[in-house]
Amino acid sequence: MAIVVVFAYLGTMLWSVRLSFSSSRLLPKDDFVGFAQYTRLFETSRWITSLENLAVIAFFFLLICFVLGTLLAIFIDQNVRAESLFRTVFLYPYAMSFVVAGLIWQWILNPDLGIQATMRDLGFPNFVLDWTVNPDKVLYAIILATVWHGSGLVMALILAGLRGIDTQIWSATRIDGIPPWRVYLSIILPMLRPMIITSLVLLSISIVKMYDVVVAMTNGGPGTASEVPAKFIMDNLFERANIGLATAASTVLLITVLLIMVPVLYSQYFRRNGRAS
């Protein structure tokens, strides 16, 4: 198992980083060009646009998914009727692939087939919902699809944490007359810190590698309005035959993931183990 990890994962990762310092085009080359590919990468407007789009999508996706998922978990935790039905409905989108979720929302937001066409057929000729073809609004269409897909994961993790809270805490807060919203903010959510961090890490990783939902909904368009780094990498790797530039971009994404994961792993494991010892 250790050999598979070393050669299949770390080996290919290091090989990709090595290629990012070469002039590889269609086939890998063994030369060394320093940081030329990285310089060229950050001089490419399409790459800069993809990073800006990723930052916007990540901010709204993480914020809305966390708030919506937490509210759904609190709602289900109130012992509502048909609880299993609500859990299934809210979690079902996460069981789909990003491709399927993207195709569903591409159809819903398609001006010629979806909500806009339906509303105009119902007698509202001026109704406009053209997010997938409007460069200024196309990111909101992708955010909508990804939030629909990912909020169920946050709901499931937070709900599992809520079910583990000691009921004596709620009894004590009722006796003290503390309002429920204050209990959630000051007591419950801090106790759910491991679930919150886990859900945010999983959502962050899905954002960094986002590719299929963008291809399914907009294919990066209109123009490059919804371009994301993963699509930039795949296009340069398979369509433009530019392995050096693609591996340089993938190395930048790898560093981004490490910058997210290392502080989390340090705070969750190493620092905690240090206190325990």
Image: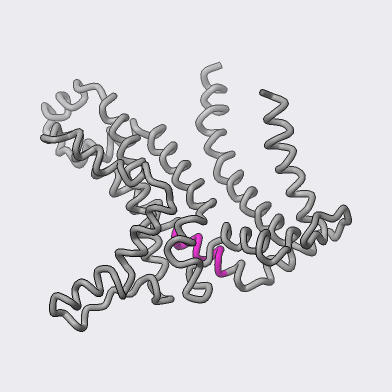
Residue 83 position within the rendered picture, expressed as x and y whole percent measured from the top left: 17, 34
In this view, the residue in front, 179 or 28, is 28
For the stretch drawn in magenta, what is the main secondary structure?
A: helix
Instruction: Tell me the quarter of the picture where residue 175 sits.
Output: top left
The reply, left or right, for residue 89 in relation to residue 253 is: left
Q: Magenta segment: does it hold 112? A: no
Instruction: Tell me the quarter of the picture where residue 171 sits.
Output: top left
Residue 75 position within the rendered picture, expressed as x and y whole percent measured from the top left: 19, 40
Vertical order, 260 against 84 (above or below): below
Vertical order, 237 against 9 (above or below): below
The reply, left or right, for residue 263 in relation to residue 111 is: right
Q: Which residues are magenta?
A: 49-57
In this view, the residue in front, 138 or 158, is 138
Q: Residue furthest right?
A: 31
Residue 5 position within the rendered picture, expressed as x and y whole percent measured from the top left: 68, 30
Q: Looking at the rendering, in which quadrant would you find the C terminus?
A: top right
Q: Looking at the rendering, in which quadrant would you find the N terminus?
A: top right
Residue appearing at x 25%, y 73% in the figure: 116
The reply, left or right, for residue 167 in relation to residue 274 is: left
Residue appearing at x 73%, y 68% in the figure: 40
Vertical order, 133 against 92 (above or below): below
Instruction: Tell me the quarter of the picture where residue 24 sits.
Output: bottom right
Residue appearing at x 52%, y 56% in the figure: 211
Q: Magenta segment: does it hold 56? A: yes
Residue appearing at x 39%, y 53% in the figure: 100
Q: Residue furthest top?
A: 277
Residue 18 position within the rendered picture, expressed as x and y whole percent measured from the top left: 79, 49
The reply, left or right, for residue 38 in relation to residue 98 is: right
